[in-house]
Image (cartoon, rainbow, N blue to C red):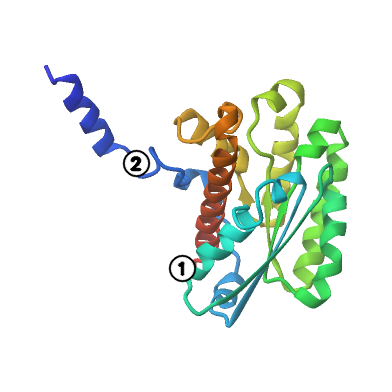
């Protein structure tokens, strides 16, 4: 009979690369390709606009996921002039997030827009159709300005799952993203996977570790977004 320590070593050796890290499993990435991304990533400049509610700016600016994403893009594409702008406001729904981004569009002219939404709608029980209509018209508007768009769903929360019909909003976002042929950044599934694997669990982090856990969460989110960008930019 194999000793327990040897069995554990075998399990670690055979485990997928993401089992003990926050790498996103391939089946939690969206296969949708975006034809404008490859050319944009060749530079000379790559501009990313991020919009969301409070979590966009929940960490110190240098460790928040928009800036961590900028660092990863510069590392992966040396010589690329990466510019990232982020706009977020606590309690903002999809329509209000779009309004935060709108003033930047004419001058910033983003190549990629990351649109994070859904949590506020679910918490407040706002009409799902209003959210999806905003996403549909907003995606068309952003594309008309030359941008590719990725939509990010809510962050995983046991409390939210117990107190709101979060799955209805997540399903609506998934269907809208598929209909509009834009990738869905499955933040809920990523974070649930990390929690189940014991890699990262924001809700259950001890008080004294919350700041460090939040910084790691933003780094992990940036890495997931980076993986999605590379997948969506494939030819």
Marker disc for residue 6: none
Query: Is disc 2 in contact with disc 1, using a CB cutoff of under 8 Å?
Result: no
In this view, the residue in front, 41 or 49, is 49
For disc 2, the marked residue is: 16
For disc 1, the marked residue is: 76
Q: Is residue 228 left or right of residue 176?
A: left
Residue shown at 76%/22% (left/top)? 163
Q: Determine if residue 185 is in view.
A: yes
Residue shown at 57%/60% (left/top)? 69
Q: Which image quadrant for residue 84?
A: bottom right
Looking at the picture, does residue 68 appear above or below residue 26? below
Residue shown at 38%/38% (left/top)? 20
**Residue 51: image x %, image y %?**
75, 56
Query: Considering the numbered disc 1 on the image, is that residue within a helix, a strand or a loop?
Result: helix
**Residue 228: image x %, image y %?**
54, 56
In this view, the residue in front, 3 or 213, is 213
Q: Residues within 10 Å of mark 2 (few under 14, many from 20)?
A: few
Q: Which image quadrant for residue 207?
A: top right
In this view, the residue in front, 83 or 190, is 83
**Residue 154: image x %, image y %?**
69, 40
Residue shown at 79%/33% (left/top)? 122
Q: Is residue 34 left or right of residue 106?
A: left
Residue that sits furthest to the left in the current view:
1
Q: Nearer the viewer, mark 2 or mark 1?
A: 1
Q: Residues within 10 Å of mark 1 (few under 14, many from 20)?
A: few
In this view, the residue in front, 204 or 177, is 204
Residue that sits furthest to the front in the current view:
208
Comes first in the chain, label 2 or label 1: 2
Quadrant containing the N terminus in the rendered view: top left
Q: Disc 2 versus disc 1: distance between alpha carbons?
A: 23 Å
**Residue 175: image x %, image y %?**
70, 44
């Amino acid at each position: 009979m194999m000793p327990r320590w040897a069995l554990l070593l075998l399990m670690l050796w055979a485990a997928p690369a993401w089992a003990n890290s926050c790498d996103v499993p391939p089946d939690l990435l969206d296969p949708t390709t975006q034809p404008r991304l490859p050319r944009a990533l060749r530079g000379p400049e790559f501009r990313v606009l991020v919009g969301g509610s409070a979590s966009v700016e929940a960490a110190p600016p240098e460790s928040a996921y928009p800036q961590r994403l900028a660092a990863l893009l510069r590392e992966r594409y040396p010589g690329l002039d990466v510019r990232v702008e982020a706009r977020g406001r606590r309690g903002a729904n999809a329509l209000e997030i779009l309004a935060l981004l709108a003033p930047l569009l004419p001058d910033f002219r983003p190549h990629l827009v990351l649109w994070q939404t859904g949590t506020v709608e679910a918490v407040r029980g706002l009409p799902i159709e209003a959210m999806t209509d905003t996403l549909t018209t907003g995606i068309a508007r952003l594309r008309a300005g030359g941008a590719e768009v990725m939509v990010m769903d809510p962050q995983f929360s046991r409390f939210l799952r117990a107190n709101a019909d979060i799955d209805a909003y997540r399903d609506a976002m998934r269907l809208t993203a598929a209909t509009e042929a834009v990738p869905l950044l499955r933040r809920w599934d990523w974070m649930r996977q990390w929690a189940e694997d014991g890699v990262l669990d924001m809700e259950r982090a001890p008080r004294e570790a919350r700041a460090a856990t939040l910084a790691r969460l933003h780094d992990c989110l940036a890495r997931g977004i980076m993986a999605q960008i590379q997948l969506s930019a494939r030819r």
